[in-house]
Image (cartoon, coloured by chain):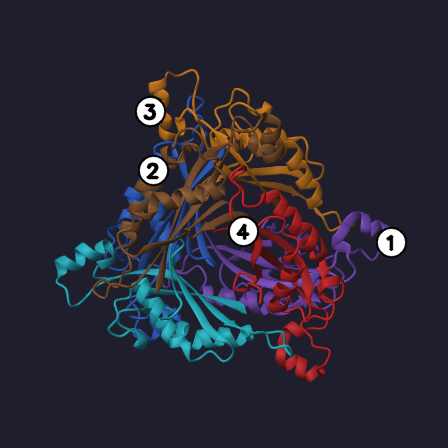
Chain colours: A brown, B orange, C red, D cyan, E blue, F purple
Amino acid sequence: MLYVTRREVFSASHRLHNPKLDDNENRSIYGKCNNQYGHGHNYILEVVIAGETDPKTGYLIDIKCLKEIILRNVIDKVDHKHLNYEVDFLKGIIPTTENLAVAIWKELKDKITSGRLFSVKLYETENNYVEYKGE
Amino acid sequence: MLYVTRREVFSASHRLHNPKLDDNENRSIYGKCNNQYGHGHNYILEVVIAGETDPKTGYLIDIKCLKEIILRNVIDKVDHKHLNYEVDFLKGIIPTTENLAVAIWKELKDKITSGRLFSVKLYETENNYVEYKGE
Amino acid sequence: MLYVTRREVFSASHRLHNPKLDDNENRSIYGKCNNQYGHGHNYILEVVIAGETDPKTGYLIDIKCLKEIILRNVIDKVDHKHLNYEVDFLKGIIPTTENLAVAIWKELKDKITSGRLFSVKLYETENNYVEYKGE
Amino acid sequence: MLYVTRREVFSASHRLHNPKLDDNENRSIYGKCNNQYGHGHNYILEVVIAGETDPKTGYLIDIKCLKEIILRNVIDKVDHKHLNYEVDFLKGIIPTTENLAVAIWKELKDKITSGRLFSVKLYETENNYVEYKGE
Amino acid sequence: MLYVTRREVFSASHRLHNPKLDDNENRSIYGKCNNQYGHGHNYILEVVIAGETDPKTGYLIDIKCLKEIILRNVIDKVDHKHLNYEVDFLKGIIPTTENLAVAIWKELKDKITSGRLFSVKLYETENNYVEYKGE
Amino acid sequence: MLYVTRREVFSASHRLHNPKLDDNENRSIYGKCNNQYGHGHNYILEVVIAGETDPKTGYLIDIKCLKEIILRNVIDKVDHKHLNYEVDFLKGIIPTTENLAVAIWKELKDKITSGRLFSVKLYETENNYVEYKGE
């Protein structure tokens, strides 16, 4: 069993806000992350694929293909966007790093053409990151 | 002559948009950075102080003081903010990295308590950064 | 299952020395790390919490709380200290990276307010690090 | 159970080419990586050892010994070399990152003097890496 | 005066060898870098442009344009290539980091569409790099 | 004019304390850095050499030689040492990063065999560093 990782970067803004709660509760839970105009990050996304190596190519998955899959299904949809308002696959989701990692997992899960999706790791900053390996 | 550098990090969102130009022109100049909801970054700020070492302390400037000056005058005002709408010292400024570096320079210039401000370096991403050393 | 990681940094000095062994044996085991005056490192600590996301907040654990728990229970006790002489929870422990990781695990294990402690990763330098996931 | 990691770096060139396939097929699979003169990388190798700490030393494995084992068995053989032509333990192997990680695992597996080899992680670039944990 | 930096990465192989010297002399000067099959690196290139900000755009130079200029004139010609045999603008040049930096400077000097080329910084590894600012 | 940089790393401990001042004054100036047992860092040292390229070799300075000069004159004397008590060239010096950079400059200045010493850059942590370019 081998694990192949591809790292991509995107820039986005978000606001942590639960519309089911009132303003005071939102402020007390999210603090400055609840700021109404949002704030932003350079997110780093690491996608890990698990599987066997194809003896003909020596690849588990062609990294150019993996890159294309990540760009088309995730990066193109979130880069330079506001994650609360502009991303179809994030509709109705509070854009915490936890929820983003799970949503990205769901976007990628059935698109991997060789091997299987093993984990999604998402860095909000160099000090905070989340990893999701599926249910 | 010695140069002391302090690095701080902040997260913010911005939109590149010149209100004096029409929408087409803005889109053609700024591309996806003109996206109306804005997008965001983890900015890295490096502030460089030039001067002589005080023989009594061995410091050019106490790094704790320098950190305090940067936090109070810059980071506290921009972290987790939208740079187009919420920052007094950026009013009327298109928040390109170039303009941000110059504006931060002006904020800090007269606040340095030991030595003098030598340069401000601002990373928008790991691949793009701007340095400003004053007029 | 999600994994949330928080990274913190501290600076400390230590000396590798087993008081039950004589000086020759200590020098032959630890080499220059046995130097009597000690030497130091900028340690990087990564604390990983495993658990489920709270649907109300979208958080597994509020990263500000996790940061506070790590600062109060670990960083405040070890930062700018000599690990052989000044840290209560390291009394009687040879401060190798292995032993430090286990000791930090024990300090944090019962303090996590949401989810459970999954692993402690401690970098002594950019080239050497240890991970501990409990017994 | 503890995990100790040592990181080493080497520079090498390689060409992705399967001699059993014709030129067109090679070009279509490997693209610019099939370039006949080869190209190169600064590879980063992380070797992870799993085991218990020796109470006498506080070490799972002496990091100086682990470094020596990695240098003698891997780095000395691949650093500043062409991986297709000059490395005994890579004879007959298409030098994809996947195959390199497995080959390095086999080189190291029986040479570890304390604990056991847990994983080999090989970075081809900062954006692409492979991990292998044995069959 | 402002300085804008763009960072790009390429992978290439090279061999340090002066054809005017005999084999012994080459081996004694270049050591393992003289290895006949070559070896390779992930080079990091930083290109710095100096100039004034255009008040209309807030840009010294549009970073997308700068990226295009670097890709077309340098990266496309050297990425996944052998620097001794396959790069027109390196013909007859011993591909030391020093010589590469100067050659890249010459390639870029007259292609900058806004501001002027201030410096070229080339990292061979994370530990070695060269900067060139023109004659 | 070219600039060649070599990066080396060392681990050391130090205590910020001016023996000419009393304990209260020392504590008020240096805070937790005055802790009597000292604390430590992984210092990163960058040494920059300026000069012309030798047309015969394509080198300004052979990086292996530069590495040797830095190891013999600096790293071997400070790595795994207490900077207040064990380093000849730091006798009588308060080991702030400022003073260390100047002292390392003096150690290296006359030892450079090709080109001339241009600057010494010393990182105490990833957030704080000092550069010295001579009087």
In the rendered image, the quadrant that contains the N terminus of chain D is: bottom right
Numbered label attached to residue C5? 4
Numbered label attached to residue A76? 2
Query: Which residue corresponds to mark 3?
Result: B28
Residue D121, percent from left and from top: 41, 64
Query: Which residue corresponds to mark 1?
Result: F22
Q: Amino acid at mark 4?
A: Thr
Q: Are marks 2 and 4 in contact (CB under 8 Å)?
A: no
- The residue under the point 62% across, 47% down is C67
| Label 1 and label 2 in one chain | no
Which type of secondary structure does the marked residue at label 3 adopt?
helix
Asked if residue F6 can be seen in this view, the reply is yes
Q: Amino acid at mark 2?
A: Asp
Q: Amino acid at mark 1?
A: Asp
Callout in the foreground (3, 4): 4
- Please indicate whether residue C100 sits to the left or right of residue E47 in the image: right
Q: Are marks 1 and 4 in contact (CB under 8 Å)?
A: no
Callout in the foreground (1, 4): 4
Q: CA distance from mark 1 to mark 2?
A: 62 Å
Callout in the foreground (3, 1): 3
Residue B53 to residue B29: above or below: below
